[in-house]
Amino acid sequence: MLTTEARQKILAENEAAAAELRERFARAGTLVVDLISSPGSGKTALLEATARKLAGSLRIACIVGDIATERDADRLRAAGLPSRQITTGGACHLEARNVRDALAAARFGPLDILFIENVGNLVCPASFALGEDFKIVLLSVTEGHDKPFKYPGIFSRASVALITKSDLLPYVAFDVERVRGEITTLRPNARVLLTSVVDEKGLESWCDLLRSALGEKRGVVATA
Amino acid sequence: MLTTEARQKILAENEAAAAELRERFARAGTLVVDLISSPGSGKTALLEATARKLAGSLRIACIVGDIATERDADRLRAAGLPSRQITTGGACHLEARNVRDALAAARFGPLDILFIENVGNLVCPASFALGEDFKIVLLSVTEGHDKPFKYPGIFSRASVALITKSDLLPYVAFDVERVRGEITTLRPNARVLLTSVVDEKGLESWCDLLRSALGEKRGVVATA
């Protein structure tokens, strides 16, 4: 077991690197979102669909973390989203220095929105700031409606929660209102959206949310 | 980031505690299996179904790890499986000392099979021995067929892989043979079973696997 001191040192080092990234993204006016979920909740599928909707009007790119393989970056590039894969080689989450190094290697150019697709893990990534404007948690309807209270770390830190794969609701026992209740108990002002990349449910609201967060960020930067 | 030395020290301490447990379980003739998967792949549902099939003929119990809540232990006890919840309070995996402490507190009495339901996390639990005879990885068909190569740590360490929620196969794109191929590339002798707790597919084979592993363990102990 990691001692509390060792853990605090790792988090403090990460926080310093994240603060540098945050300042840099603020100067650039780039909205940065960190997507976190279990493996297979649909992060990559959501980003593929998002790219199809936004790539014509906004400059977007993605940094994607996985234990192994370039599979997700390959899928995202095929969907028209410039992407840089970080293979962590065993590490269970991304840290701010991974993002800094990936940005240096990728040379994306000026961006409106940078997506960070974290390693598939509902636990560890929650604790690490990456310079993002906000964290987004995804929970697919096939994972069961008991999850928010079982994983309070991420559900209290994410200001946006996407309930994904809503097209599968007819085939599983999943109480959307119960999940919404648990999420807003953990984070009262959370935005909760029901989405599906199969029938496109909720995708327009999701893109509106991104556009308005980008507008707010630029407004703040402009008047600062 | 944890230094390599710090990580090796944690793993070495865990290995020592796991070796003690392994010896104790060998003396008792108790088969111990460590179930690992993402959140929502169906570990608790599998154990509920397993309890219904085995509780009349074998002495079984469960230690279940979660970040927060007693939800899983409550479900398992309701299914007739004596269970002890470990709430890790943030830690993303179980360690051998957690199992030792839970056993001391639970006082299960003599057991044929002890199930350890690990924290929902496909990454971190793979590295920690808990004194088990083998690790079992669960992957539900809704998580996508690209997962074994993306999470090679657990798929190479688990000698049994259960592909769960097979009743949902008609509604998702999931290539069972591709998954079977990736799993056996990572671990050539892995047993791969397709299961569902909804239509009970594969559950009899799963229980047979447990019964025969128990028989083998007792055979080995008896002739030692």
Image: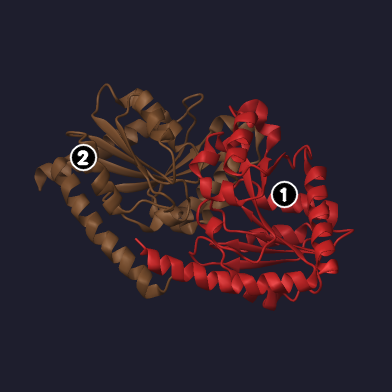
Chain colours: A red, B brown
Residue at mark 1: chain: A
Residue closest to the eye, B207 or B177: B207
Q: Amino acid at mark 1?
A: Leu
Q: Nearer the viewer, residue A21 or B72?
A: A21
Count neighbours of disc 2 (C-alpha within 10 A) and say few if under 14, some if 14 to 19, many if 20 or more.
many
Number of marks in picture: 2
Are the residues under badges 2 and 1 in a single subunit? Answer: no
Q: In the image, is A149 to the left or to the right of B19?
A: right
Tell me where residue A187 appears, x and y as whole percent: 61, 44
* Residue A163 at x, y percent in the picture: 66, 40
Q: CA distance from mark 2 to mark 1?
A: 45 Å
Q: Is residue B45 visible?
A: yes
Residue behind mark 2:
B30
Say which amino acid is labelled 2.
Thr
Residue A46 circle label: 1
Q: Secondary structure at mark 1?
A: helix
Near-viewer residue (A166 or B107): B107
Residue at x 83% of width, y 48% of height: A208
Image location of residue B89, percent across then percent down = 41, 49
Horizontal side of A212 relative to A94 (left or right) equals right
Chain of the residue on which disc 2 is drawn: B
Q: Quadrant of residue A82?
A: bottom right
Indicate whether A116 appears above or below A149.
Answer: below
Point out which mark residue B116 bears.
none
Callout 1 crowding tier (Cα within 10 Å): few <14, some 14–19, many ≥20: many
Rendered residue at 26%/51% (across/down): B131
Residue visible at 51% across and 39% down? A149
Task: Determine whether the residue tagged by mark 2 lies in a helix, strand or loop.
Answer: loop
Residue under the image location 85 percent in, 67 percent down: A223
Q: Position of residue B220 (x, y in %)?
A: 16, 45
Identify which residue, A122 or B206, lies in the foreground.
Answer: A122
